[in-house]
Amino acid sequence: MHAFREAANAVRRAPFLTVLSAAMVALALYVVGIFGVATFNLHQALQRIEERVEVVAYLRDGARPSEITLLEEDVLRMEEVRGVRFVSKEDALEAARRDLPEFEELFVGLDSNPLPASIEIELLEGFRTPNAVARVAERLTIYPFVEDVRYGQEWVDRLYLLQRIGGLATLILGGAFAVVAALIIGTAIRIAIFARREEIFVMRLVGATNGFVRRPFLLEGAFTGALGGAMAVGFTWFTYQLISRAIFRLEWIPLSWILSGVAGGALFGLMASGLAVRRYLQEV
Amino acid sequence: MIRFSKVTKAYPRRGKALDDISFQVEKGEFVFITGHSGSGKSTALRLLHFAERPTDGEVRVSGFSSTVTSDRELWKLRRRVGMVFQDFRLLPGRTARDNVEFALEVTGTRRGEIVSRSNRLLSQVGLAAKSGARVEELSGGEQQRVAIARALANEPQVLLADEPTGNLDERASRGIMDLFRELNASGMAILMATHDLELVRAHPAIRLLELSQGRLAFDSSLGVVTEAPPGPEAPDRTAAPVLPGGEV
Ligand SMILES: Nc1ncnc2c1ncn2[C@@H]1O[C@H](COP(=O)(O)OP(=O)(O)O)[C@@H](O)[C@H]1O
Ligand SMILES: [Mg+2]
């Protein structure tokens, strides 16, 4: 009770400092939040793409049916593969006419079918990563009657790279802001300790426990952090709305991420003030 | 109850504030610690309150040892050993009652008990009528009484007083001494640092420890302890030490 009251007093006494500290925490977590939205959406996109990830081996026109059957059997034995489907030249043309009606006239009046036959290879879940896909594709190129292997590597690679860059940027930017936020919280705690040095002296003089002396400052830090976390959620949501309306539709991050953000802010504030308290209580 | 065993306290670049001091104080004893300014009186009291630790030797106070008791456990000692200062160290802007209740609150006393305890403490130090006055409205002597009430809040067995009359006029000083003697008569051990020789002379029955440049120069219960010459301010009793049997 005493600790709550004192923490509240400290906030009331220096509201500007509390808001400034909270804003710094908010900035740190905002960066994390923005990248959180991005990462979440990238993740969703990757998953959708991964579901459709397949390797397509285009066959030379001269490939014999027995060779094709042999290839299908070999492919089915690979541990990454869930199934194979043979697409004949006719099937390919059919599909092209259906999927690309705007190019209709390209396909009419052809003497010969320009499209190659292919086999489409569906991969097992867990093997739809760039590495696994490339591995399967690599093996297929060995067959002389396989003309080309495609697996949308550019897209997959690019998304994975984006995800990794996003993670790294979050780490660096979020980390930088977190350090600044910790310093500001530390300063706020130091000022609060200094403002109350006489009381702290008396508390220790008459036998208050260390925990009792520290608790208000830790609470203050945790509160500041939680406030910062909540602000960050607000900023992030605002930014999300802006992008979603003006540029492209995004999905909002799950509630559990938001709660972790606020809890993370509180925990961060607690740790920052814990360090500050340990350091600055010795000075009074 | 209290034992200094070969205690030395050295400050970096300041030399030894206390140099190989040994003495013992029994339960319920009243002791003056006297000596020139800078002789180490305050340092001795701070060591007794474990506000600082000796550089060498051991300080024992009601079961706590300077070499064993950790900082985490200090609060236990502080509730057994009260302390008051020359400048009172009261919380400004608050009433006498608030200052006493603060000590009870921060040591986890139950709400219901706080009021009755502070009432009792304030009347014990003779301030029942002024409990609602703010610290700034009280005289020096009254402020020191508030500080004493606060020091007694957790019913300590020992009271340490560092020049408690140093800022007070003669009348107020006498009042504080009377209060101390009352407390002492009801069993409280009191160690009081003072360089007021008038006051020391006025209480010949109280044991006297004299410090000189960090050394124990004189203990009225034993006679002269070291060859260190007593300072010019040394009380008369140096010449004719009161032997243990002479103490009341
Ligand atoms: N915190 C400190 N740092 C450095 N020197 C100190 C400190 N406290 C006391 N001293 C030195 O120790 C000696 C004894 O001081 P003190 O115990 O305050 O004496 P007294 O209370 O008898 O006047 C003095 O020389 C003083 O300068
Ligand atoms: Mg002193």
Image (cartoon, rainbow, N blue to C red):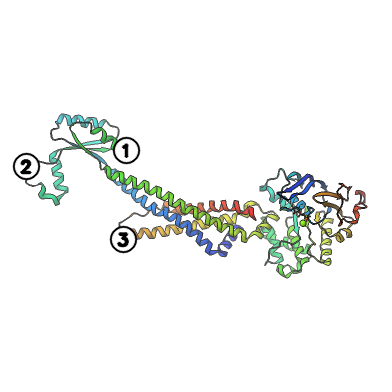
To which residue does mark 3 refer? A246
Helix, strand or loop for disc 2: loop
* A104 lies left or right of B164: left
Dot 1 or dot 3: first in sequence order is 1
Image height check: is B200 above or below B10? below
User: Where is mark 1, residue-wise?
Assistant: A131
Tag 2 and tag 1 share a subunit: yes
Rate crowding at label 2 as few (under 14), some (14 to 19) or many (20 or more) other CA atoms within 10 Å. Answer: few
Q: Ligand 1 near label 2 (Cβ, under 8 Å)?
A: no
Q: CA distance from mark 2 to mark 1?
A: 40 Å
Label 1 Cα crowd, 10 Å radius (few <14 / some 14-19 / many 20+): few
Which of the two discs, 2 and 3, labels the residue nearer the N terminus?
2
Q: Inspect the image, locate mark 3, and give the three-letter code of the amino acid beneath it.
A: Ala
- Distance from disc 2 to disc 3, alpha carbons, whole Å, reads 48 Å
Within 10 angstroms of label 3, few (less than 14), some, or many (20 or more) residues?
few
Task: Examine the rendered structure and indicate whether residue A77 appears above or below residue A31.
Answer: above
User: Considering the image in quadrants, where does the C terminus of chain A appear?
Assistant: bottom right
The chain that hosts pointer 1 is A
- Label 2: which residue? A111
Badge 2 vs badge 1, beta-carbon distance below 8 Å: no
Which kind of residue does numbered mark 2 sit on?
Answer: Asp
Residue A230 image position (x, y, % from top left): 46, 58
On residue A39, the disc is none
